[in-house]
């Protein structure tokens, strides 16, 4: 028998075995089980499939490796991967179902000629589409978008600000690369913000009218679940800038201490320190546009009677036009003195519409800084305390997290651990009915927080109604409250955290919610606990983390890397702010465990520095979706004897690879790209966030922590856990996966 014939007989026999096993030859070869494929090769192919998010293919490859190698660890890995593949398929099916449902809603509203509402549903469909770019090019979608653009322009011309705002928001989602929608949205939002601040009753009327207009759409989309008396609570809420303020929070309180001298100092600093070239001419023109918005927004005359006089308003607008002409002749110097220009405008105001001096100053500043980037802004005396609270992580209060229910009730989400509220016996789901004897029903969250917070040592009385109906007054002495930024997987009864998402494999979960002055110490304590308890891997969750202090981000990076660049900054022009580079130090490293970082499109600023740094150093694998792209450096410049501050962008952040984090207009590269992309729809994210919040609630007593299947509703966490399970169970898996992370994703 010839060798060729012998090989042919063997091949036929192998084919017969494959057919008998119920698997065609081509399928086996396509899956990587070609003759000669080793267990190591199958595993490497499986990890490559993981990198590209092909969980089902990965599961099949590991099953083959397990069958071929008879290795219990591979069998275990195959089991984990199979569970993830099934979960991924479920999430994909949910995404498709959500997308199809949104499209059905669009067509339902179009059939009733409710095209504005149809555009809103179209925008929601766009973010759920399997391929948003292709979906946006479908002819019927293009037609509806064009109709929306025409309607938005018409509403804007007719001063129907909320309707225009809604459509511009939707158009910004549907055509994110078109800057005109963001520009139009910025202008109309400033008008609405002015109405909400200065004439809250007018704003309330606009919101009520908009709610009524939305009721028809909600009745069509949810006829069985939206009774007439509940529709208003179910409609899409206007944006935060449209929410009318209560009488207790007047514009006079908000603008206390605002003056034009402070504005002039701020513009001098902006001209000198802003990261990109700017001119006094452009700043002044922007300031004039801010004043023009006040002069041309009807409804503000209820707060400023001078605006009701058409002749005076026309004279003021003419003075603004003349000022713009003069400003356009300016260079970057002060050929027309800024002080002189502001004096002329003040004089025109006093001779015509006579808006209050603090309003004049605030609106000029808003318009001037609006010519810069969205992160450069004034922090007026009224806002300094709140800004400090956000960055320092401490404030005076009683230590509770609250929310406003649909019926206007003020509900306790959870007391903070070992806080005055916790020690007083306030519990989750309690209702705050009164604050210092005044009804808390229907007040805004901001007003409630401002009233409950205060100087440490002073008391506040909260009237609490428990779920069982009991009502009790709690007089609580405020203390300095430390906001915890590092949390674990579940909140233990009576305090503390359980960090283990997988106790058997000793895989920990650490949730970092923001970067405050206490974050580094909190992380150090958590890492010490994990090292002592034998942790084998860490999932660091930075999703929805808006950032915070650069120093905290650098310190936390240094807990995981021993040398090299952490982050660098530099402006786009020569300014007094010199380029900076922050480097790691070996003596600060506290953790060398395998690590996965979870990110999403709401991970911003300092969270992008940490995830990008640890990715560039190949210290962690990144799982989730591309981050927000907020890579601008803000410095604070004290003004007016430290009563006010200018928050100004002075540079951009650059990762160790040299990549700029910041997302510029029309840019295609920004933020931090995940090594393993795991998308989640808005509905899926909401479900996961609510489950996470439930697990964070502090409950006293045994067996009071509700069971949560967080992994069953959070595909990004489940994927991160899978990665670490593979890494800690097999050193070859760790080496292969780390090698894959440094290469382009394979299809």
Image (tube, grey):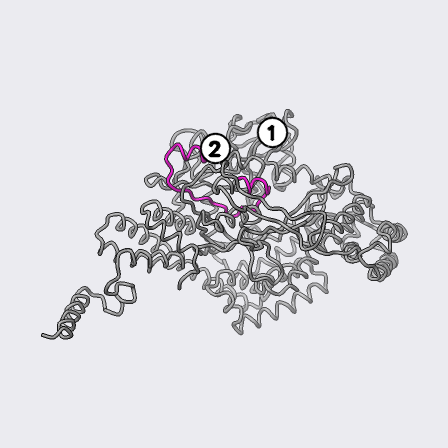
Q: Hey, which quadrant is residue 46 in on the image?
A: bottom left
Instruction: Tally the marks.
Output: 2
User: Mark 2 or 1 closer to N-term?
Assistant: 1
Locate residue 328, reporting x and y percent: 82, 61
**Mark 2 sits on what residue?**
525
Where does the magenta region start and end? 527-555
Q: Quadrant of the N terminus?
A: bottom left
**Mark 1 sits on what residue?**
480
**Camera-side residue of 19 and 239:** 19
Q: Mark 1: few, some, or many residues within 10 Å (few <14, many ≥20)?
A: some
* Residue 294 visible in image: no
Q: Quadrant of the C terminus?
A: bottom left
Tag 1, which secondary structure?
strand
Locate residue 166, reporting x and y percent: 62, 59
Left or right of 580? Residue 416 is: left
**Camera-side residue of 311 and 531:** 531
Extreme-left residue of the structure: 1
Left or right of 602? Residue 712 is: left
Tag 2, which secondary structure?
helix
Instruction: Identify the residue at image location x=63%, y=37%.
Output: 389
- Is 132 inside the magenta-drawn segment? no
């Amino acid at each position: 028998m010839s060798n060729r014939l012998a090989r042919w007989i063997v091949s036929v026999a192998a084919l017969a075995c494959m057919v008998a096993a119920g698997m065609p030859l081509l399928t086996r070869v396509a899956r990587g089980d070609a003759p000669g494929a080793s267990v190591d090769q199958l595993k490497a192919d499986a990890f490559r499939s993981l990198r590209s998010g092909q969980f089902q293919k990965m599961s099949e490859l590991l099953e083959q490796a397990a069958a071929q190698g008879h290795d219990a660890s591979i069998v275990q890995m195959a089991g984990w991967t199979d569970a993830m593949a099934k979960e991924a398929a479920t999430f994909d099916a949910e995404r498709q179902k959500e997308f199809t449902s949104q499209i059905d809603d669009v067509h339902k509203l179009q059939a009733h000629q409710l095209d504005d509402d149809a555009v809103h549903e179209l925008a929601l469909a766009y973010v759920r589409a399997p391929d948003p770019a292709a979906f946006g090019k479908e002819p019927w979608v293009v037609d509806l978008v064009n109709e929306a653009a025409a309607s938005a322009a018409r509403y804007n011309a007719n001063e129907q600000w909320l309707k225009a705002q809604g459509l511009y928001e939707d158009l910004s989602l549907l055509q994110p690369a078109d800057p005109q929608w963001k520009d139009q949205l910025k202008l109309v939002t400033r008008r609405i913000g002015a109405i909400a601040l200065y004439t809250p009753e007018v704003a309330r009327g606009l919101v009520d009218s908009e709610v009524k207009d939305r009721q028809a759409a909600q009745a069509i989309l949810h006829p069985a679940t939206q009774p007439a008396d509940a529709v208003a609570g179910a409609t899409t809420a206007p944006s935060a800038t449209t929410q009318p303020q209560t009488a207790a929070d007047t514009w006079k309180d908000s603008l206390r201490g605002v003056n034009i001298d402070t504005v002039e100092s701020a513009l001098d600093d902006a001209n000198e320190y802003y990261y990109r070239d700017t001119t006094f001419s452009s700043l002044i023109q922007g300031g004039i546009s801010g004043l023009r918005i006040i002069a041309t927004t009807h409804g503000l005359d209820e707060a400023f009677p001078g605006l009701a006089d058409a002749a005076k308003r026309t004279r003021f607008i003419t003075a603004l036009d003349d000022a713009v002409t003069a400003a356009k002749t300016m260079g970057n110097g002060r050929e027309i003195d800024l002080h002189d220009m502001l004096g002329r405008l003040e004089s025109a105001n006093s001779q015509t519409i006579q808006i209050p001096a603090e309003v004049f100053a605030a609106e000029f500043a808003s318009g001037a800084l609006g010519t810069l980037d969205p992160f450069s802004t004034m922090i007026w005396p009224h806002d300094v305390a709140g800004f400090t609270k956000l960055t320092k992580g401490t404030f005076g209060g009683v230590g509770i997290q609250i929310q406003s229910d649909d019926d206007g009730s003020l509900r306790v989400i959870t007391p903070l651990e070992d806080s005055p509220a916790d020690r007083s016996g306030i519990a989750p789901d309690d209702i705050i009915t009164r604050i210092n004897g005044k009804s808390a029903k229907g007040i805004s969250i901001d007003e409630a927080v401002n009233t409950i917070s205060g100087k440490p040592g002073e008391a506040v009385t909260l009237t609490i109604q428990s779920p069982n109906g009991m009502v009790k007054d709690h007089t609580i002495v405020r203390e300095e409250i430390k906001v915890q930024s590092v949390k674990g997987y579940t909140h233990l009864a009576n305090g503390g955290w359980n960090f283990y998402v997988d106790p058997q494999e000793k895989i920990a979960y650490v949730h970092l919610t923001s970067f405050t002055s206490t974050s580094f110490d909190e992380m150090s304590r958590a890492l010490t606990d994990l090292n002592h308890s034998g942790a084998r891997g860490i999932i660091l969750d930075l999703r929805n983390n808006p950032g915070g202090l650069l120093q905290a981000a650098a310190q936390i990076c240094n807990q995981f890397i021993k040398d090299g660049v952490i982050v660098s900054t530099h402006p786009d022009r020569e300014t007094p702010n010199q380029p900076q580079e922050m480097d790691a130090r070996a003596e600060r490293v506290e953790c060398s465990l395998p690590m996965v970082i979870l990110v999403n499109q709401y991970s911003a600023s300092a969270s992008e520095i940490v995830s990008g740094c640890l990715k560039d150093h190949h210290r962690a694998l990144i799982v989730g979706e591309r981050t927000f792209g907020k890579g601008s450096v803000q410095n604070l410049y004290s003004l007016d004897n430290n009563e006010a501050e200018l928050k100004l962008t002075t540079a951009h952040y650059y990762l160790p690879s040299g990549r700029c984090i910041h997302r510029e207009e029309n840019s295609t590269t920004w933020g931090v790209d995940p090594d393993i992309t795991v998308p989640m729809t808005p509905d899926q994210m909401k479900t996961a966030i609510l489950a996470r919040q439930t697990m964070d609630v502090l409950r006293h007593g045994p067996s009071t922590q509700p069971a949560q299947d967080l992994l069953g509703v959070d595909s990004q966490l489940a994927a991160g856990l899978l990665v670490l399970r593979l890494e800690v169970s097999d050193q070859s898996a760790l080496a292969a996966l780390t090698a894959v992370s440094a290469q382009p994703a394979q299809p």
